[in-house]
Image (cartoon, rainbow, N blue to C red):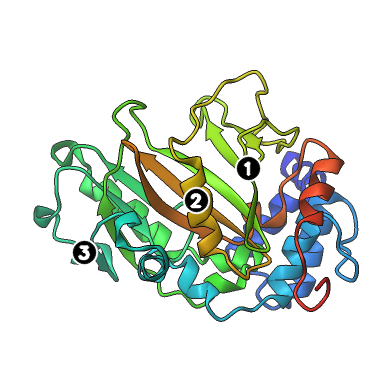
Amino acid sequence: MRLIKKAISRPVKVLTVLGRNGFLNWMSDEAYIRLLYRAEFRERLDLEHPETFNQKMQWLKLHDRNPAYPEMVDKYEAKRYVSDIIGPEYIIPAFGVWDSFDEIDFDRLPNQFVLKCTHDSGGILICRDKNTFDIAQARKKMNHFLKHDYYHFGREWPYKNIRPRILAEQYMEDEEAGELRDYKFLCFDGKVKCFKIDFDRFSGHHANYYDPDARLLDVGIVNNPPVYDRELYMPTDLEKMKQISEKLTKGLPFCRTDLYEVNGRIYFGELTFYPASGFAKYTTKDADLELGSWIPLPGKDR
């Protein structure tokens, strides 16, 4: 009875589980997105006259079918795509890519490395010391990640036919910070309108948003709330990061460019077309509307 009550109170959780496991594949993308949106926000999704950021994310999933997107979100293929635009010096070195975990020759990998799946978001393992790295546990986790069809949950079509593989990359860490500093640039119509910095990931996970000149914005997400009095480390070369982001997103209605700063050098992380799959709850309705107003919908707003 408790489980039934919980399911009724949080139907989006039920839909998420069903969607991730492919039980709702019989539904069209639009029908599924409308259902999930209503469950999450308790309101009808307006695809005819979308205004908010979340609404426009759903519209873009259904109508912006740029054939380059699958290559841009594939963790391995994106390296080549991005290198051709901004140069190989911004690409994190790769040690190899494999179809299965058992193809990996760990003897040929350095003492520190990162394993990630090429076809999803979040399928990642970090090895800081190969001598203590649990290969059996890593195999179990990576095989689970390989089976995960990222398209199923939010119907983010660029991920639909990406070949699941495992990529090994160089381990990156900023000496001063003792971690990987990453900056997420939100580009609207090829222009950086704001960027965000995530922090305290393992003790609360917060995120602050800033305008292109690093001034704090009154924008935030409920699940990762901003801390307005927290002073965060800003990129050494903010202007260069903005230039890179705008080169990579030129001509696109929306794309988030994730960049790292490691010991004063800039590295490319990934490209994201639908942050939180368009289901993030903002701290204010005005924030959702303002971000949405910056997105021109192809063939609709131009």
Q: Which residue sits furthest top?
A: 229
- Pinpoint residue 142: horizontal percent, then vertical percent: 35, 56
Q: In the drawing, does residue 116 fall left or right of residue 127?
A: right
Report the front residue among 131 and 257: 257
- Pinpoint residue 253: horizontal percent, then vertical percent: 68, 66
Report the front residue among 64 and 28: 64
Q: Which residue is mark 3?
A: 102
Residue 212 — which label?
1
Quarter placement of the C terminus? bottom right
- Pinpoint residue 286: horizontal percent, then vertical percent: 86, 42
Residue displayed at 54% across by 73% down: 69
- Residue 188 higher or lower than 165, as above or below: above
Say which amino acid is labelled 1: Pro
Q: In the drawing, does residue 72 fall left or right of residue 130?
A: right
- Residue 63 higher or lower than 39, as above or below: below
Q: Secondary structure at mark 3?
A: helix
Q: Earlier in the sequence, mark 3 or mark 1?
A: 3
- Residue 57 higher or lower than 66, as above or below: above
Could you classify mark 2 by the number of other residues whose Cα lies within 10 Å: few (under 14), some (14-19), or many (20 or more)? Answer: many
Could you classify mark 1 by the number of other residues whose Cα lies within 10 Å: few (under 14), some (14-19), or many (20 or more)? Answer: some
Q: Secondary structure at mark 1?
A: loop
Q: Which residue is mark 2?
A: 258
